[in-house]
């Protein structure tokens, strides 16, 4: 099954996609993670993307479309995948239509209040990449899984969070209509507890 996770920043796309990968074997194709990896490795693509990401802007369509096209051609993506953070514009969605068949688009619906709480408390492990919320951490600086150093993402600063939400409303929200028209959209309410949300997602997907 080829799945898209749509939703505002902080809706939980990455969290649930990572879990689907571990528990059900669906490759998680996260454009945000791929871009951050390119930045960490100092690739030309990373250098081109860094400023956009730090400022909460979208990376230009042609950059991410090329990246995803390449990724979807890899062997592990031929038997289903979860797209997490792509497409984010109508142009990206149209390009994707020419690259892969999509079976279902889950729109993870969340209130702005939840988004602000989740993103401002988000911490990421610099060693293993796991994501946590400060409300669940004894020590906000140490990864409970691997002992690595926890950091706040540059784009999780309050001003940048608000800007990312604006960008989401303007550029990504139109995709809800786009995929509804295509008959692919299913809405899932994802305020509240992450385990409950995950169970709802499995139920909707029928897996
Ligand atoms: P979140 O969903 O919490 O905003 P992501 O990791 O998905 O986090 O994205 C972080 C940033 O990476 C975005 O703000 C944007 O700058 C860039 N990015 C990720 N995916 C895309 C995309 N499909 N198109 C353009 N920019 C993207
Ligand atoms: Zn870790």
Image: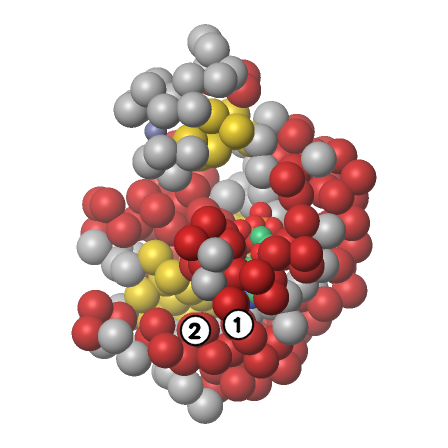
Considering depth in this image, is 186 or 25 the residue closer to the camera?
25
The residue to which callout 2 is attached is 68
Q: Is mark 2 within 8 Å of ligand 1?
A: yes
Quadrant (top left, top right, bottom left, bottom right) of the C terminus: bottom left
State which image quarter holds ligand 2.
top left
Query: Residue lying farthest top?
Result: 138
Residue in view at x 33 percent, y 36 percent? 128
Labelled pair 1, 2 in contact (Cβ < 8 Å): yes
Q: Position of residue 53 (x, y in %)?
A: 64, 54
Q: Quadrant of residue 204?
A: bottom left
Residue 95, placed above or below residue 121: below
**Disc 1/disc 2 C-alpha distance (Å):** 6 Å
Q: Position of residue 3 (x, y in %)?
A: 39, 66
- In the figure, residue 116 lies in which quadrant? top right
Residue designated by label 1: 64
Q: Position of residue 76 (x, y in %)?
A: 21, 68
Is 194 placed left or right of 202 in the picture?
right
* Residue 5 in sight in this render: no
Q: Is residue 73 visible?
A: yes
Label 1 CB sits under 8 Å from any ligand 1 atom: yes
């Amino acid at each position: 099954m080829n799945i898209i996770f749509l939703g505002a920043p902080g809706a939980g796309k990455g969290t649930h996609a990572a879990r689907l990968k571990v528990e059900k074997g669906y490759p998680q194709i996260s454009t945000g993670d791929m871009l951050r990896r390119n930045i960490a490795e100092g690739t030309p693509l990373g250098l081109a993307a860094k400023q956009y990401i730090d400022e909460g802007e979208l990376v230009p369509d042609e950059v991410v479309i090329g990246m995803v096209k390449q990724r979807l051609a890899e062997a592990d993506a031929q038997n289903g995948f979860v797209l997490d953070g792509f497409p984010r514009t109508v142009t990206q969605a149209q390009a994707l239509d020419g690259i892969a068949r999509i079976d279902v688009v889950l729109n993870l619906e969340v209130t702005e209040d939840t988004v602000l709480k989740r993103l401002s408390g988000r911490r990421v492990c610099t060693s293993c990449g796991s994501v946590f919320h400060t409300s669940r951490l004894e020590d906000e600086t140490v990864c409970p899984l691997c002992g690595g150093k926890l950091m706040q993402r540059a784009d999780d600063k309050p001003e940048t969070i608000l800007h990312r939400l604006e960008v989401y409303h303007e550029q990504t929200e139109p995709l809800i209509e786009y995929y509804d028209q295509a008959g692919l959209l299913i809405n899932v309410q994802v305020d509240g507890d992450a385990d409950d949300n995950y169970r709802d997602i499995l139920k909707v997907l029928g897996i």
